[in-house]
Amino acid sequence: MTTPTLQAAFKHISDEQEGFTKRLLDYLRMPSISAQGIGMVEVAEFLTGFLTDLGLETRAMPTPGWPVIVGKYIKKTDAPTVLLYGHYDVQPPDPLGAWTSPPFEPEIRNGRIYARGAGDNKGQHFAQLLALETLLKTTGELPCNVIVMLEGEEEIGSPHLASFIRENKDDLKADLVITSDGPVHDSGRATLMFGVRGVLSFELKARGANRDLHSGNWGGIAPNPLWTLTHLLATMKNTDGHVTIDGFYDHVLPPTDLERQAIAKLPVDVNKVKRDLELKELDAPLDRGFYERLSLWPTLTINGLHGGYGDAGSKTVLPHEAFAKCDIRLVEAQNADDIFSKLEAHVQKHAPEIELVRQGSMEPSKTPLEHPFTEPLRQAIELAQEEEPLLVPAMGGSLPDYVFTKILSIPAFVVPYANADEANHAPNENLELERFIKGIKTGVAMLSYLAASRS
């Protein structure tokens, strides 16, 4: 569906490529590091002014942390309302010495913009904003009602987002949410994602004597907290890869036929993955498919195990304390509170002397592949990016999509614009210029196709 409206918008984007790129470079020069409080107020003010100048009713809405920028264009009674989510905060740029060019002095090399925030997430949500600007300049209006919501705390775990959504549910009423964040599929193919896994982080603390002891004088007398801890961990997952916490899999849903079909179409060279990582085999269970693992199954991971002596040589010490940091990735229908209560029961049963400390959590989220908005989004992405997108039932990592699907009760879609090797969170973060421009076109096409789906 290449309408005259879309043709005019696409021509405008092509004509303005140089100007759009320059404006993105200017935006990337503005630090906005939420963890350190650097530049956050200035960037919030910039975005508020940008959206206001577009004609959106815009507010910088306070939270206990950094503000959420909300801009609204609600003018059509017969069109869907699309919520566009992004985040204006970025990761700290350390280690600075690993950057080829300074992180907040963007540089274009070999068709890519290198800067902190280029892919995560300034370049991606700026493409969405330029899509709005393009439609307003070429047609005088937006085809849909639009709510833009830009968060300032995503890189520190979105600690206030859920409460913000609950407190402003009436102000954020929409038919769907689109997030442009993260990279496209590893193959480089355009991607439409329908969900994310959740995450639950926790720490286990085991203690023995009140100080480290000589292993010869005290071994076999004083309990060794490292053994206490490893024995407990061994009761939580077996060598077949099965998590053995009672009830852990109770709410894991079987995949739908559409999910199975979509996963089967996702390209992967498992042998290349193993070569790149120097692995002899994937983790157990060995018969589980690559993307089946990432989309459909929960995990239990030991992130770190600490205690006793770890430096060069040997030290015959019996440690007095040991720690394990772990995370559980959750799939749709699992719940962080429920899984943590089962984890508590397991620790109490097997090692009640070990302290279990809950840390952060984020719920999983999933939108059905058969949702009515899937087809217009798929067609729009195919038109703008000139290839059919891969459909991913759920990504392996976590985003705060649950605030939309579980609090606002609306479908959530992720349409990434960044290249697979964007190096987000790392030195030399980058965004391919071609993908940035295609992102603007995709934003235009998605709103146009969604509007047409209601006509």
Image (cartoon, helix red, strand yellow):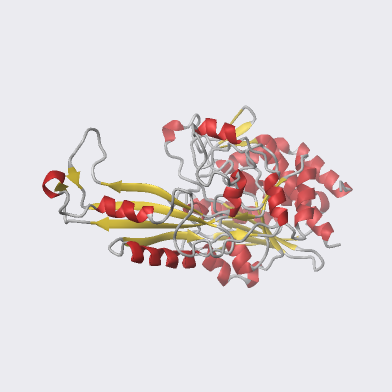
Residue with the most extreme left position: 217
- Residue 186 seen anywhere in this rendered image of the structure: yes
Q: Residue at x 83, y 52 (%)?
A: 139
Look at the picture and state if 247 lies above or below 112. below
Give the quarter of the image for residue 177: bottom right
Q: Residue furthest top?
A: 110
Q: Which quadrant of the rendered structure holds the C terminus?
A: bottom right
Task: Judge by depth and name the residue closer to the eye, 195 or 96.
Answer: 195
Q: Is residue 273 above or below residue 219?
A: above
Q: Residue at x 66, y 43 (%)?
A: 417
| Closer to the camera in the image, 158 or 19 | 158
In the picture, measured across the screen, residue 361 lies left or right of residue 107, that is left
Q: Is residue 144 above or below residue 288?
A: below
Q: State which quadrant residue 383 falls in.
A: top right
Residue farthest to the right?
4
Which is more toward the observer, 238 or 370? 238
For the question of whether residue 83 can be seen, the reply is no
Q: Position of residue 83 (x, y in %)?
A: 68, 60
**Residue at image coords 30%, 65%:** 352
How many marks the image carries: the answer is: 0
Position in image of residue 118 (x %, y %): 58, 41
State left or right for residue 182 relative to residue 260.
left
